[in-house]
Image: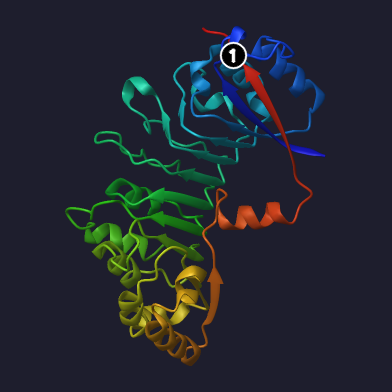
Amino acid sequence: MVKKITIKAHAKRKEELSPSVDLIRPDRSLQTILNLVPNVNSLRLPEDWQDHPRIKRVISRTGSRWTELDVDGDIELSRVGGWNYLPNLKKLRCWSYGYRERLLHSAPIPDTLDTLDCWGPRPSGSELPPPPTNSNLRVFRTQISHDALWFITHLTKLEHLVLIESPLPLSPSPDPSVLSQFSHLPSLKSLTYKSSHSTPYFHPTLALLLSHLPPSVERLEFPHVVPFDQLETFFASPVSSSIRTLGLSRKVVNSGVFSGQVGTLTEVSQAKGIEIDLIDEAKGVFREFSRLLACLPYTTLTHIFSLPDL
């Protein structure tokens, strides 16, 4: 059974293609495919999909069927009626979103959204707007920034948070009031922290987040680099008492380079009744999403369009 459609577009001229390739209008081809698989509700789009108006029109016309969008670029909402054209969207992965004339990220997320992977750094003046008061966002992945931390503190139903370290430390440090609100998130169960460095150097923000970890958090994950020094300090504090599982990079642990630190951390974890789980970097939207797909008979329909010059 087809579960997801992936669109790959190239802009070759007709004379550059094999004589056996028929050059057809991509919007008609896409509409034909969608008619053949009416139950498909998951769509992956290339980075430049919005440069092709006909494709964009088909997607917007069929917007109510999409519950999952995986976009290798931006979602620009100004010409498609804002979020209204995606009334049933539950999972979204994209670089950024919003109204281009008012900078991306300028559109509050819909309250239907359950999972948001917004992985692009935000330019100055393009801060995240507050989520709706009835936000149902349960899983959020983003690069660390002042506005992202502020945004997170308003997500009362957030269960799984994935933070990607920014290339430079936050300056100034996060406001104490934001950290205090972070520590009171009522539903957060897991925190995954991905360093942007290949060595165990971590920004001071990580230590601040660990010292203000909500008591509901039971799982910590470090799939890239393991912050041994920060974890030693963290597990010596009462705030660590809720942790039941510690996910550590399989590559780091098995490398043997940090065998001493791994041994010490293992002893501390065992003394506290914490299970250590060796993990790999998730290549999907989220680790839990990737595991789910691995367990399903999952077929991807890929259609390659020959796009004429527009």
Residue linked to disc 1? 307
Residue placed at 63% from the left, 28% from the top? 7
**The image quarter in which residue 23 lies:** top right
Q: Does 142 sit left or right of 270 as displayed?
A: left
Residue placed at 50% from the left, 71% from the top? 247
**The image quarter in which residue 203 lies:** bottom left
The location of residue 242, given as percent across then percent down, is 47, 78
Q: Looking at the picture, does residue 196 appear above or below residue 83?
A: below
The location of residue 257, given as percent across then percent down, is 39, 77
Residue placed at 66% from the left, 24% from the top? 304
Whether residue 256 is visible: yes
Q: Does 230 sit left or right of 276 as displayed?
A: left
**The image quarter in which residue 176 lies:** bottom left
The location of residue 28, given as percent across then percent down, is 70, 12
Q: Looking at the picture, does residue 299 appear above or below residue 201?
A: above
The location of residue 211, given as percent across then percent down, is 31, 72
Q: Residue furthest left?
A: 172
Residue placed at 45% from the left, 71% from the top? 252
Q: Looking at the picture, does residue 258 appear above or below residue 300?
A: below
